[in-house]
Amino acid sequence: GLDNADYVFAYGRLRTGFWHQFLLGRRTPVGSGRTSEKYALYASPFPYVRMDQPVSPIRGEVYAVNARILRDMDSLMCCPAWYRRCEVLVVLDNGLQVTAWMYERRGTGGILVEAGDLWDRAEAVAEPD
């Protein structure tokens, strides 16, 4: 069940089809949705969200994870040294609201994705072979 589960909101490489998904195993997202608040999503080799810039709701997927996967994700995201893990409210496409962890970074560079959805940008999802 989802008791004792943490939720993670994945907006970048952890979304379905991205190469970091092996971390989430063969997990199916709890749902797709967008953040209830507006943030700024930047496309770059390491996509990031800035929570201090209200541009648009961020589109992504919510996964239920256990403590071990969360630790592995923190390690992958160099949290807390590079990315910070913050709680955000996510409105799922089915109307439900969940509180989930999101990785944010006070980064610079990259391309602002004004729509808040990395999958709207072909260059943002192209991965080298």
Image (cartoon, helix red, strand yellow):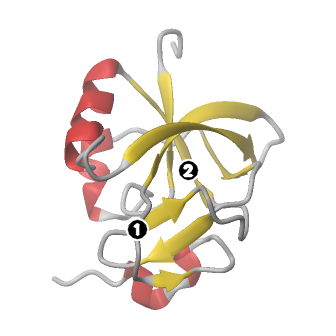
Residue situated furthest right in the rendering:
95
- For numbered disc 1, what is the local secondary structure? loop
Q: Residue furthest left?
A: 129
Residue labelled with disc 2: 61
**Contact? badges 2 and 1 (CB < 8 Å):** no
Mark 2 and mark 1: Cα distance apart in space: 22 Å
Q: Position of residue 36 (x, y in %)?
A: 77, 48
Which quadrant would the C terminus be assigned to in this image?
A: bottom left
Q: Nearer the viewer, residue 37 or 70?
A: 37
Amino acid marked by disc 2: Glu
* Residue toward you, 111 or 5: 111
What residue is rendered at 44% in x and 64% in y? 48
Q: Is residue 84 above or below residue 57?
A: above
Q: Which mark is residue 107?
A: 1
Q: Position of residue 88 (x, y in %)?
A: 63, 39
Circle 1: is it few (<14), some (14-19), or many (20+) Cα within 10 Å?
some
- Quadrant in which residue 68 is drawn: top left
Residue 97: image location, x then y, percent: 76, 34
Residue 85 numbered tag = none
- Residue drawn where x is 84% and y is 41% of the image: 95
Measured along the vertical axis of the image, is residue 70 above or below residue 88? Answer: above
In the image, what residue occupies the spot 55% across and 82% down? 112
The residue positioned 25% from the left and 46% from the top of the image is 81
Q: Amino acid at mark 1?
A: Gly
